Image (cartoon, helix red, strand yellow):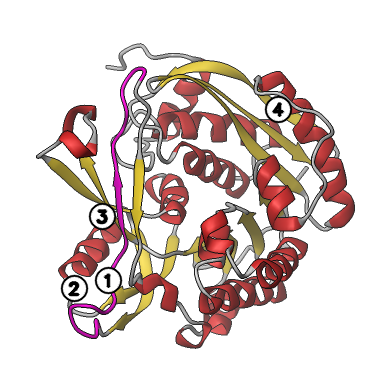
Amino acid sequence: MKINLRDQYAYALVVPTSIGVRITPENGQPVHSSSKFTMQVTSAETNVASISSYLGLPVKVLTTFVKDSPIAAMIKSDLLSRHMAYEGKDVPQGGPWGYRHQFNIADSGYGSRGPRVHNDRAGEVGRTLNVKDFDLDRIFGQEGVRILHLSGLVAALSPETSTFCLELARTAKKYGTCISFDLNYRASFWENREKELAAIFAEIASLADVLVGNEEDFQLCLGIKGPEAGGKDIAAKIDSFKEMIARVKQAFPSVSVFATTLRQVISANQHLWGAILLAGDAWYVAESREITVLDRIGGGDGFVGGLLYAILRGWEPEKWVQFGWASGALATTMLTDYGIPADEDQIWSIWKGNARVKR
């Protein structure tokens, strides 16, 4: 199966995002008992884009910044270091109690102690992302984009970002850009906006070529009936996912690809990691294998990033799920929230289970 991608383009991948920083204690320690922390730039959508950008494909980030903020300066420098172009408005802070970039305060966990994440998003400047601040006809029509990747996290941030993501999808479809949509349901984002967001997510899904999400995402974002019975083991998850996707395909017949990751946590540092993909009418499964985890945050984003990179390279679907699986596994070996592949061979070595030294 092949996905139709534009031949003429400036960007292989475009992602809209709200970017902030993550603060992480050293040496896997809990936040509440630590005095030394590392601060790094992070967002789920740039986590996805990093696989393509580090492997040499042109990537663009659509976002917004706090004007004259040292955090904004850090973010801009970080994006350039990751080989990403960016476009976005500088929004005046509005005083000490005005806008800021979000803070994600999270430890990595260790052994039997699971990681804990605290999101501090008050005054988040990314909630101001507005379609009026971007020339979508220039980006998608004149410059050209092969894949637009949208996340439900951004689509649900605010009424402005919901409209922004919807207009991005509409414009991308008009110009023949492939659309990827990771549903990413968050109950706190949907509170008191359920009816509004359900309609927006349904329209974006109806325009999408690639849909990513777990059973909960499809049920709560798109109102698709869940499986009659399920289980916590991965074999049961595969069966229930297949059962659900049959109903999703009926509701959204224009979608060509459905995918999800499969994770069973043994300890903070040992997971069973798998993935499943439906391309056309054919299923592809990356059977679950045990992986060693340094930090789990970003593993799912790494999977999507690897999947989209494989699609952009024009490989066969069997390789899409394999490269996605290995890209996600790579991300969990790093203290960044995203994978930084040296080259394709490094990712394929992970898939093959080859951890031997390369000289």
Find numbered disc 3 in the image and state the secondary structure of the residue it sits on: helix
Q: Secondary structure at mark 4?
A: helix
| Residue 151 in view | no
Q: Which residue is mark 2?
A: 69
Q: Upstream in the sequence, badge 3 or badge 1?
A: 3
Relative to residue 336, is residue 326 drawn left or right?
Answer: right
Label 2, label 3: how far apart the Cα atoms are: 19 Å
Q: Which residue is mark 3?
A: 81
In this view, the residue in front, 329 or 60, is 329
Q: Is residue 45 above or below residue 283?
A: below
Q: Please say if the residues under marks 4 and 1 sit with CB atoms less than 8 Å apart.
A: no
Residue 100 disc label? 1
Q: Are discs 2 and 4 less than 8 Å apart at CB? A: no
The answer to which of marks 2 and 3 sits earlier in the sequence is 2
Q: Earlier in the sequence, mark 4 or mark 3?
A: 3
99 is within the stretch colored magenta:
yes
